[in-house]
Image (spheres, rainbow, N blue to C red):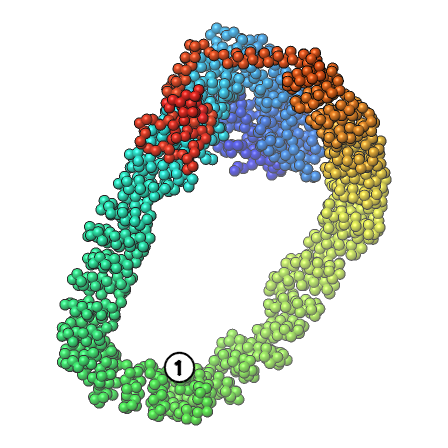
Amino acid sequence: VFDRHPTIGANTQIINYQVSPDSKWCLLGGISAGQGGGVNGNMQLYSVDKKVSQPLQGHAGAFATIKLVGREDPAQLLVFHEKKVEDPSHKLFVMEVGRDPSKGAPFRLPPTVIPVPAEAAQDFPVSMVIDAKDDVAFLLSKMGFVYMFDIHSGKTMFRTRITQETVFVTCAQSATGAVFGITVRSGRVLRISLNGQNLVPYIVNTLRDTELAIKVAGRLGLPGAEHLYTQEFERLIGAGQVKEAAALVAGSGSALRTPQTIARFQQIPAQPGAPQPVFQYFSTLLENGKLNEQESIELAKPVLQQGRPQLMEKWLKDDKLHCSEALGDLIMPHDTAMALSVYLRSECHGKAIQCFVQRGEYDKIVPYSTSVGYSMDYSSMLSQLLFSNPQGALDLAKGLVSAEGGPLIDIQATAEAFLSSNRVQETTAFLLEALKDNKQEHAYLQTKLLEINLIGGAPQVADAIMQNGILTHYDRAHVGKLCERAGMWQRAAEHYTDINDIKRVFKNSHQMNPEFVVTYFGKLNREQSIALLKDMISRGPSNMQVCVEVAKKYHEELGSEELVKVFENAKATEGLYYYLGAVVNFSEDPIVHFKYIQSACMLGQFKEAERVCRDSNIYDPDIVKTYLKNAKLPDPRPLIHVCDRFDFVDELTEYLYLNSLLQYVEVYVTKVSPTKTPQVVGKLFDLGANEDFTKRILMAVGTACPVEEMVETAETRNRLRMLQPWLEARVATGSTEPGTHNALGKIYIQLNKDPKAFLTNNMFYEPKVLGPFCESLDPSLAFVAYKKGAGECDDELIKISFTHGLFRDLARYLVERQDLELWAKVLTKDESEEGNAEKESQRRQLIDQVVEWALPESESADEVSCTVKAFMAADLPGELITLLERIILQGSDFSDNKNLQNLLILTAIRADHTRVAGYIDQLDNFDAKDIALICVSESHMLYEEAYSIYNKFAKPEHTTDKEEQVEMQVLAIGVLVDFMKDLDRAKGFANQVDEKPVWSKLGVSQLEEKMAAEAIISFINAEDPSEYVKVCDEANEAEIYAELIPFLKMARKNLQENLLDTELIYAYAKVNNLTDLEVFVNGPNVANIQTIGDRCFSEGLYVAAKILFKSINNNSKVALCHIHLEEYREAVSAATQANNVSTWKQVCFACLKAEEFRLAATCGLEVIKYPDHVDDVVTYYSDLGYFDQLVSLFEQGLGLEDAHIGIFTELGILYTKHVPEKVMEHCKVFFSKLNVSKVVRACERARLWSPAVYLYMADKQADNAVKVMTEHATSFDNDLFLDSIIKVRNGEIMYKAVNFYLTMHPMLFTRLMEVLEELVDHSRVVNQLRRTGDWALQIGQAYMKSVQKSNFSAVNEALNELYIEDEDYESLRKSIDKFQNFNMIALASKLATHELLEFRRISAYVYRCNKKWSHSIELSKNDRMWKDCIDTANESADAEIIENLLRFFCETSEKECFCAALYTCFSHVRPDVALELGWLNGYQHFIMPFLIQNMRQTFDRLSTLEERTKPPPEEGNQDQIAGTYSQLGGFNSGMLMLENGGGMGGMMPPQQGMQGGIDMSGFAPAGGMPQPGMMPNGGMPNPGMMPNGMGNPGMMPGSM
């Protein structure tokens, strides 16, 4: 992207790189070493557009995008830290980058000093992260300090140290604004985020920066600055600074935006020439964001009063106002559309629907209601709209039935309502919408929809509905009758399924569309179609054309045979002809083709008959032929085509001949089918026709007649000679047909007309035809004919030669042919010929003729070569040797032929190897190398012969080229060493020829035979290092390093290979020639020193290995060599130079084993720096029993600069084993650096329970801490236990703790339960107390009282039992009153027999609380607690119980109680009961108060009733009646008010003009009963259903 700036040079370490959000600015940051151990920071700011850089002195920076007050566009800021070398202060810069100058000056803050603590003077930032959510910057330093800055002001808001380690990587979480960081060494993940609840109080109280607190609280909406806002607001208002006060409120979040603030601005008087303060306030709020509900309402009031709704529309569009129902109500009188928008946003669904109604947008009501889940009384709304706005009612009804989730109204009732108003068109439209889903349950409504249009004068509508096919479940038979009645024949036919109905309708088929008629047949089954077709054809020729069209289209479905019968039965031949003519070209039915031919012939259409007979392959030829022959047609051409195509030529010829139609015979063979001439002529021969007529036919046909068939026909009838003129005429025309010449040849041979000349010179006859023909006449002519075949008749030629002794001719033929396959036929013996002396004699005679005559006569090399190959292939070696010796050794033109010499030697090798050596000496022109290779092959193994060939041709007289001589010598020694395995003879041969390749070949063989020393000498003589790999391997195996060194030195002269130098070094080491070894190693070489060093080390050559490892600075290995040489100090020194853990570990263990403890400790400190190797050190020390040294080693390790958690952990474990008194101190001091789980396990193994508890608590493993304290009494500490128990994760531990305290520390149980009160199931605890014993309940009484407020049944019952046991009835009564969650009946039963009165009263009270009135009263009666009896009876409100109690008081003469009961139970006592009891018992004075009060109550009720039922004044009554009639007649000015009842109650009855029209009663259910809420009798009300008993049929009930 860009190059580094010079200030960020090679010595600078890059630590961060940032890119701006618009990707146009880059910030690169790095650090470098400064003077005095300080760290300098340098950054480079790069502009991608301008391609320029600016250096900055600082350590960290980042880009941020914020929204500034008073600006529309966001600001892209660079926030960075600056620290100059000469200036010790740290500063924060905030500046805008990338702003368009045309939009104004960029935002920039003056630099602010960062408060760096004194102890962090050498500290420097490592990263800066932006919290984009809160516009806060976090700066993290190397020493673990974090600084938090407000980007808008650049001020520092907070500083603290969060870690002792360096945070090396950071990132921000955009969703929460948190910053995450990871520390370097421990890998801890830190999360840093803004604490909004405490930030503002911290700024106010600690930083004491009120201005910053106000700005931050307002911008982020944080609590804590409310009093500051109030004070500042009052100050500004008091100073008259209205605009500033408004800005303060706008920036305060929600703290000051209250109705009181609006009132304050409204109360401020306006200044002359200035806007009103409240408008200034609202303007400021609008600039800064969105108004709340109250502000929006208060702003809307004056704006709408001033008639400026466009401002409201703009603010709503910009989402500046809070939409509410009250705001919509304000806007509604001024602008319905705007009010609708407000209602929709504020989710005031009812008001929104009212707006839709007022705007006439009925189609939007249902989708809106459905989308928001709002329910309303649609039936009432629909009824009101039906008479005032039918179209609106229709739109609404459509929406209701199309609502998601199913129709919201009853479809049938709604349709009836439309029809009752004679709205057929609207009814149709509504039902179409309602029934569009085409459901089965709407079948009745579909039928009625079609019926009202068919009967009501709109059949075209019904036709269109049926045409669209959207309804399919209606009563098709009923609709079909209606269609037929309306003259819609096609629709009627579509709906009928009975064939009789269909036939009746199709009587009017002349009025139907022919296309419909044809298509309609496709809907019928086969039987119906045939029946209807018969019916239509029977009505005369008027339907013939459409019947033909039907037959054409459906002939496959109906069957051609049936259709033909229909036409034939109706004697409609012409219709049958036209029907079959349309399908015959595509039909594969033989009957169709035959009937078409027949009908064509009957109608005189001979051309069509001829065409079908000529082109069709479908008809039955026998049937057609028979019909045509019997028909005796004047034109026999159809019959000719049939007989010609289906090979009835003999019958045709006979028919034409016998019927004197000879001219058609000649026409047939010349123009129709000349190839059938032989059949015609043969039939004419059989019929005894005139030969002249036959010859004339043949001459007329000429060359078009097939020769072979004609000749065969003539031969079978012994008429061949009759064809001679016709054949010679064909030859004269230049015919080359073999059949013609074969026939002429036969004629000439029979006539002995110079047959040999014909056979020799004619090129066109077939030898396989004339050869057999001649064999019986003359074998020599047959041989001539077969020889003419040029190989096609070789088998026949061989057979006739062997049969008739023509061996010399056959031998000459074989030599001339040069065909190996043909030779194989005569020379190779078949298995079937074994033991056949005659066949062998014939083969021998043939071979003799070849050797004696045929081959010597030949002067062609190819013929000789082919013959030799044939003998070879026939496996006749003896005969072949004889043949070749005659050709080569007895002198001929082919004596020096290389191929023949090669063949002679090879044949001898295979057949008689004793002759091979002689042939090698006699012959000189053969392929020596190839022959020699064959000699040494496994199948022959003629090694001496092969050596002789190589030795012979290695001499100069046979091979002049020196290189070829050497090659032959190499091949010769190869035979000696590879095949004969005679290395001594080979060594002598090598000394004799003394050629380097020969020595090399010998060396390789010696090497293979494990003669390493001899092989090395041979390779040195050959100066050949090529086999150095094998030589080295064999020398190493034989351990002849002294002999190997000269070879390696020789090889290094020509080759520079790694293996040579490596092996030479190893050889020096093995012979202990360390001087030469060191010189060689220090000199130039390509040896693999490491490998050979490892090899020497593994073999114990430690001195040599040390020299080698030192030469390559492998200090690790050098250290190991020193160890093996017991040079321990040198080993430590080498390990220091190597500085790797494995070396340190090995040296440490070696020193330890040698009891060099100081050196071992030095190495051990380096090893334990690596956590993975700590266990190995501990194990080794422990195995040797050096525990004190081990503990000392790890104690020293604590002081290491990079001491890790493993050292502290392992030391803690060692303390548990060997120094237990130090464990607790170690855990407390170094807890943060311990692996707690490992140390805890060690403590538990060592039975150190107190440290284990401490570690568990410190590691927040409260469960385990509690478990240890409960299991081991020595570790128990009450305060520690209580602190732990509330932190456990497993709730079961709490209940175990309860048992533990009850068992071990019962006096502390109450304190435990105070801690666990909010955490345990109290019912379970009470059960534990019960199981423990009664004393446990007593101990837990205080705890149960404290938790009884939760009203648990178990707690209540336990406490109640304790109260009963303690006879504390007051506490029991209070407990029952406050806490009733227990088995109250059981408690009442238990207390009913208690010996104390108060407890029995409590039992009665409990029965009373549970409405067990009788039980309660009986208990109170037994204890003579009369007041309790009276209160219980009054509370029961049961007249029977009260009457029984009154009678009881009368029986027991408790007059005062009787009077008190009347007074208390006044509202529940019947007056007659009181009078009866008072009269019977003489208690008139006691019942008098009751009677007086009862009379007063009766009087008041009658007065109220008279007031309510008083008749109205006469005038008002008349007005009310008139209003009622006006509502019934005029429907309340067009609006019909309906109750929210079911169905369509309140609908008008049908108008009088509709009577006798459409039957409305059809909408009633099948049972004839009206729907609930619907009017019976088709919409007419019953007389008894009118209000006030009125039976006027013109009126209707107000409610059903």
Which x, y percent locates residue 1012?
Answer: 66, 72
- In the picture of the structure, the residue carrying the numbered disc 1 is 821
Give 840 or 1591, whichever is nearer the viewer: 1591
Compared to residue 1111, the image places residue 788 above or below, namely below
Is residue 837 among the parts visible in the rendering? yes
Which x, y percent locates residue 1526?
Answer: 38, 17
Dot 1 falls on a residue whose secondary structure is helix
Give 1548 or 1057, whichever is nearer the viewer: 1548
Find the residue positioned furthest to the front.
1480
Compared to residue 1080, the image places residue 1265 above or below, namely above
Seen at 83% across and 33% down, the residue is 1334
Which x, y percent locates residue 1356?
Answer: 75, 29
Horizontal arrangement in the rendering, residue 1362 relative to residue 130 (left or right): right
Give 786 or 1156, whichever is nearer the viewer: 786
Give 1343 or 147, whichever is nearer the viewer: 1343
Seen at 39% across and 25% down, the residue is 385
Find the residue positioned furthest to the top.
272
Seen at 51% across and 11% down, the residue is 277
Classify 10 Å Cα crowding around label 1: few (below 14), some (14-19), many (20 and above): few
Is residue 345 among the parts visible in the rendering? no
Tag 1: amino acid: Glu
Horizontal arrangement in the rendering, residue 388 relative to residue 590 (left or right): right
Quarter of the picture containing the C terminus is top left
Seen at 63% across and 16% down, the residue is 228
Compared to residue 843, the image places residue 448 above or below, namely above
Residue 1053's quadrant in the figure?
bottom right
Which x, y percent locates residue 1307?
Answer: 84, 31
Residue 719's quadrant in the figure?
bottom left
